[in-house]
Image (tube, grey):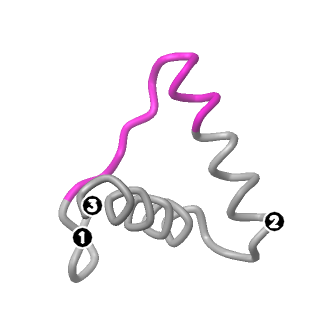
């Protein structure tokens, strides 16, 4: 599998808790007309801004 430009790592969802979080992420993405990847990036950036700054 080739990585996209700018891709650093992937997220592997294995445990039931992780799968539940992934399903919530899928729903968030769907509700906002985004891809799951774009939604994950957006949420991560928002969270980091809140907790790092």
The residue at which mark 1 appears reads as 7
Q: Residues within 10 Å of mark 2 (few under 14, many from 20)?
A: few
Label 3, label 1: how far apart the Cα atoms are: 12 Å
Most foreground residue, 48 or 10: 48
Q: Which residues are magenta?
A: 9-21
- Looking at the rendered image, the quarter that the N terminus falls into is bottom left
Q: In front: mark 2 or mark 1?
A: 2
Dot 3 or dot 1: first in sequence order is 3
Most foreground residue, 1 or 48: 48
| Magenta segment includes 10 | yes
Most foreground residue, 21 or 6: 21
Residue 7, position in %: x, y?
24, 70
Question: Any mark on residue 1, and which?
Answer: 3
Question: Any mark on residue 31, and which?
Answer: 2
Work out whether 52 lies above or below 22: below
| Magenta segment includes 50 | no
Q: Secondary structure at mark 2?
A: helix
Most foreground residue, 50 or 24: 50
Residue 49, position in %: x, y?
34, 66
């Amino acid at each position: 599998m080739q990585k996209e430009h700018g891709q650093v790592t992937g997220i592997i969802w294995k445990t039931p808790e992780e799968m539940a979080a992934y399903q919530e992420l899928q729903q968030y993405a769907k509700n906002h007309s985004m891809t799951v990847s774009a939604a994950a990036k957006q949420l991560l950036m928002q969270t980091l801004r809140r907790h790092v700054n």
